[in-house]
Amino acid sequence: MVAAAVLALVLVAFYLSWRATRLDRLHHRVETTRAALDAALLRRGSAVLDLVAADGLPPERARALADAATAARRAPETQRELAESALSRALRAAVEPSDAFGGLPDHLTEVASAARRVHLARTFHNDAVADTRRARRSRLPRALRLAGTAPLPDFFEIDDEPPAIPPPPAGPDTL
């Protein structure tokens, strides 16, 4: 009888330890994906500023892009989603009529690649946040406070649709 109670207690303790460790791993995953998202956003901002510095854009488009990229970099954390969304919109408005950019295919390709990476990083981050919230929402972790004092992670919602940039024309030496 005592052995059964001790065994049950050990199994419950093992299960609770496993759940707490799982929550810790999920929170670590959120932190990691957030760092990757921040890096992707900075990379996109740098690619946009490189495009502007290439001096092939019309001045009004270059100014709008530079202002949006600078605002996104300097935005406080509470305003970051709005600033990054504004950069996405400015990027699409400035780049999508890409017929005027004959001399900037490398810069446009880099911007398009960075914008796709932002979309992927945001998707991975939001998936990690959803998994963590789902795990914390069940009764046992809430009742026993298995998540400790870790704050509930937030989704990162921005307009991250990449601009429609056609691929550069294939030359004779690209096969």
Image: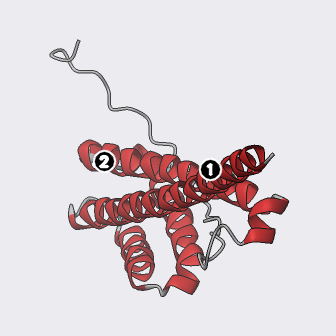
Query: Quick check: 98 above or below 94?
Result: above
Give the number of the mark in front: 1 or 2. 1
Q: Quadrant of residue 50?
A: bottom left
Q: Secondary structure at mark 1?
A: helix
Location of the N terminus (image quadrant)? top right
Numbered circle sitting on residue 110 = 2
According to the image, what is the colour scheme of the structure? secondary structure
In the image, is 38 to the left or to the right of 122? left
Q: Position of residue 94 (x, y in %)?
A: 47, 61
Numbered circle sitting on residue 148 = none
In the image, is 87 to the left or to the right of 143? left
At a point 45% along the width and 60% down the height, the residue shown is 37
At a point 60% along the width and 65% down the height, the residue shown is 156
Q: Callout 2, which amino acid?
A: Glu
Q: Nearer the viewer, residue 33 or 111?
A: 33
Query: Quick check: 150 above or below 79?
Result: above
According to the picture, the residue beneath numbered tag 1 turns out to be: 14
Q: Secondary structure at mark 2?
A: helix
Q: Nearer the viewer, residue 108 or 155?
A: 155
Q: Are there few (<14), some (14-19), or many (20+) residues within 10 Å of tag 1?
A: few
In the image, is 37 to the left or to the right of 20? left
The mark nearer the N terminus, 1 or 2, is: 1
Q: Position of residue 96 (x, y in %)?
A: 50, 50
| Residue located farthest toward the top when viewing the structure as drawn | 175
Q: Position of residue 131 (x, y in %)?
A: 67, 51
| Residue located farthest toward the front when viewing the structure as drawn | 1
At a point 43% along the width and 82% down the height, the residue shown is 71
Q: Position of residue 61 (x, y in %)?
A: 42, 68
Q: Callout 1, which amino acid?
A: Phe
Spatial CA distance of label 1 from label 2 is: 49 Å
